[in-house]
Structure formats: C-alpha cells, structure tokens
Image: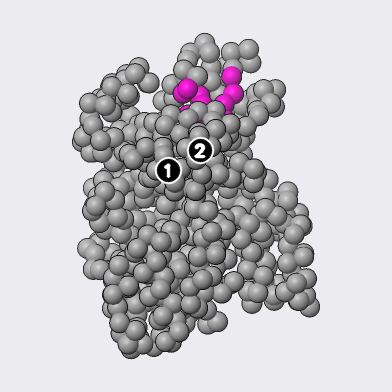
Amino acid sequence: MHLDPEGSYQALISRDARFDGRFFVGVTSTGIYCRPICRVRRPKQENCTFHANAAAAEASGFRPCLRCRPELAPGNAPMDASVLLAHRIAMALQAGIGLDDGLEALAVRFGVSERHVRRVFCIEYGVSPVEFLQTQRLLTAKRLLTDTGMPMSEVAWASGFSSLRRFNALFQERYRLKPSDLRKQGPRLETAEGFRFCLPFRPPYDAARLLGFLGLRAIPGMETFDGSTYRRTIAVQARGNRFQGWLSVRLLSNSNSLEAVLSPSLGPVIPLVLTRLAHLLDLGGHPEVIEARLGSLAEARPGLRVPGVMDGFELAVRAVLGQQVTVKAARTMAQRVLETFGDPVATPFEALRWTFPSPERLAMVLPEELGALGILRTRSATIKALARAIADKELRLEPGVDVDSTLKALLSLPGIGDWTAHYIAMRALAWPDAFVATDYGVRTALPGLSTKEIKARAEAWRPWRAYAVMHLWASLEN
C-alpha cells in the first residue's frame, strides 16, 4: 500500500479521526509508532515515517505508543479487488485462525500455494503472515494487560501464545519492557460486572441506526435493545472448549467509540469476541470512501454501516426463517428454535436466558421436531442441510472465506436462493459488494425498475453495493 508522506503528515497535523487506522506514523527520534490521532507533541516531519499497518511499523523497529494505543485503531476494510486474497488471509488471522499447522495449511484453506500466500501478503502488508500474526497477538496481549486484571498466563493463552515463556520473551524483545511493567502503568477497565472495552470507529458512524437494526430483529431470550444499549448472549468454540456468556454495547457520548462489556465467563476468548464485535458493528468501515462512491444515495445518511453478525450459522438460520415473511414473523420462529434447542446460560439479565443452538445440535434434530414449531418442511430441510454442512466443516460462514465458492456452496443447498445467499454474504461474510436485487425493500425503494434494471443501476455502486442496500432500506423509513 503506497502512502503519500506529505498527505499523511497533513492528516497527522489535523489529527483527523477519519484517518485513524488507515496508517500509522513511526517517529525515528523516539522509536515509537502512533495513530494519526495521537495527542502527544507533534513530531517534526523529517522524523516521521508512515506505515500502512501496525505490523509494518513494528517490522521497521518501532514499538507501540502507550498513550494512543495502536491496538485500539479501527481495522482496515478491503478496498481493492486485486489485494482481496491478502485481506482475506489477514481477516482469518485476526479471527483467531493461527499458523499452528504451518503456512502450508493456511494456503490449503484458501486454495493457493504457500509461496503465493507469502508473496501477496508481503506485497500488501509489507510483512510475512507470521510477522503479522505475531503483531496481532502482541497487541491483543497489550490490550488485555492494560484493560483487564487477567492473570499473566491467561493473557498469554487468550492472545494465542502456547507458552508463557515465549510470550514473555517476545513481548520484551519487541516492546523493550516486561509484560508486568506495562500492567503497572495501565488503567483497568475491568469491573465486577465484567470486562469493559472501548471500541473506536472512524466517523461519521450512525450508531443509532445500526443498533436499531439489531434491536428490531432481536430474538427474545437471546437479545435485548432498550433504545441505547444492545445486549445478547454468545457461545464461542475455541481450542476444543465451548464458552458461553453475554455482552453489551452502547455508544459513548462525545467520543468516536462504542463501549462493550463482556461477561467474566468470556475471559479466555476475549480476542475472538472483540473480533466478532468489530464485524457485528462494522467498525472498520471507510465512510468517506464508501459515500463518495454511492453519491447522492448516501448524502442524507452519513455514517450508515452494514450490520455484521456474531455467528454466521445463526444468521443463516435466521435468514432461512425470514424467507418471504415479515421481520416479526421471522423473529417469532427464531425464538421457538432458541427456546427448544438452545443451551441455557446464566446471566444477570432476566431477559437473556439462552444461547443459539450449535450447528451440531440442529443437524441432529428430526424434521418433525422443527415442524412442530410451525416451520415449513422445506425450510426445515434447508436448516438441517446448513447445519450438517457447517458441522462437517464443508461450509464456513465467516469473514475472510472465498466469496464465490461460498456462494456456490450455499446455492447448492436445498431452499437457498439468490436472495438468501447474498444476504448471508452481506452480513456473515462481510462482503461489501453483496447485493440483494430481488429484495422487496430494494424493489420498493427503486419503483418501476425490473430486477435487470436494478442490477444495472447498482453497477455504479460497486464495490460497495451492500452499503447501497442499507441506504435503500433506510430511505423507506423517511
């Protein structure tokens, strides 16, 4: 990624939050790298070097600023199809898919050679996948050391290190201080209620519409929204264990960030939950780039984002239940599935009692059991086929997977049509160019146009057609 030094320095001077996470500045006089919004004394231009990501800055010998905390910068979203593979690999690494089985196994996952993985990744990020993953793990550990009171061994484990000794050695080598020294300096956001985290975003950000979208579709027993705070239960499978708990999200006033609270039971999987939250809330979006492409369609609604998901399988089941019915009817069906096949979970909130059933659980359910809930036979068959494909690891519904092959696999399942497949791609795969041309809301927002004409109109919105869908839906509210 090419960075213009003069333009980057001007962004640094202005401390414009829209550039947060787009690049990092290394200061040669201090050996530290910062976010462009850092409030420390402005460095001289001749002392600044600019880097596309944190891993590139650390590979150049810089260590992270303790004040602006680079690990909190909003993530980068893919913006060029030619580097999509590199971004998919990075998303997989950030989502907790490590290199325990070697780079060759990662290459097999993406259907390319090990050499090709290394080449495209280095071209885009300036570092190898191994170096990138090390930086992600160290920044995660730095965040946990600063914001929680987790024991050192649990911090190392949750960050992806298999050895406390290796964690201590690499942390001290890279950051020139011991993990215990950093803990003495940092503020603790942890409370008796749970782990508290700040989730920065790039403004503008329409939090009200995004949280409202989730709230309108909230399944009773699993999700709640009171107009300002969204809460839900969650189950995470990691390293052979299943962790259940709850989380909440709300907008912080006078701040370009949201606040998340995670239950204590999610401590061992904090990095995975935070990654999924960033996906759910679309924290890595580039509003100025997207809205410039969408033009007049986006003018009335700056900062509108595409809601992601906490679990791709859950979203897929909900999409099937929502085929050709109202949002309310789909929510009712989903509640029946939750209460019949979900797992009970202890929370301090009376309204949160269940976690969504796993694919393994629904794969074993008999068709007549789903039929007893009022679910049509054809949709029962679709849900079971989805569950079996995911349980057998023949299908993955998560950011970073190959979109074309995943869409093909989805469309091969009984009862999955173009609308369902693209809706899943839009929200579960975080594919910014997904487009549901046959959607009722899209057709209503573009009256008088045939499906072919709607697709032709949408060509001007590439590669951000998923955001165009959100704007078309939102236009019906006005």
Q: Position of residue 228 (x, y in %)?
A: 45, 60
Count of numbered circles on the image: 2
Q: Which badge, 1 or 2, is on the more N-terminal residue?
A: 1
Residue at the image position 73 percent from the left and 67 percent from the top: 455
User: How would you rate the neighbour count of disc 2 (Cα within 10 Å): few for under 14, some for 14-19, many for 20 or more?
Assistant: many
Where residue 14 is drawn, which disc sits there? none
Disc 1: CA contacts within 10 A as few (<14), some (14-19) or many (>=20): many
- Identified at 22% across, 26% down, the residue is 165
Instruction: Give yes or no for residue 365 being in the magenta stretch.
Output: no
84 vs 58: above or below: below
Dividing the image into 4 quarters, which one contains the C terminus?
Answer: bottom right
Q: Which mark is residue 106?
A: 1
Question: Circles 1 and 2: CB distance less than 8 Å?
Answer: yes
Is there any visible trace of residue 156 in the rendered image?
Answer: yes
Which residue appears at 56% of the width and 61% of the height?
426
Assign a secondary structure to mark 2.
helix
In the image, 215 versus 422, the foreground residue is 422
Magenta segment: does it hold 57?
Answer: yes
- Badge 2 amino acid: Val
Q: Secondary structure at mark 1?
A: helix
Q: Amino acid at mark 1?
A: Leu
Q: Point out the stretch of residues depicted in magenta.
A: 49-59
**Where's residue 92, x and y in %?**
44, 46
Say which residue label 2 marks.
117
Image quadrant where one finds the N terminus: top right
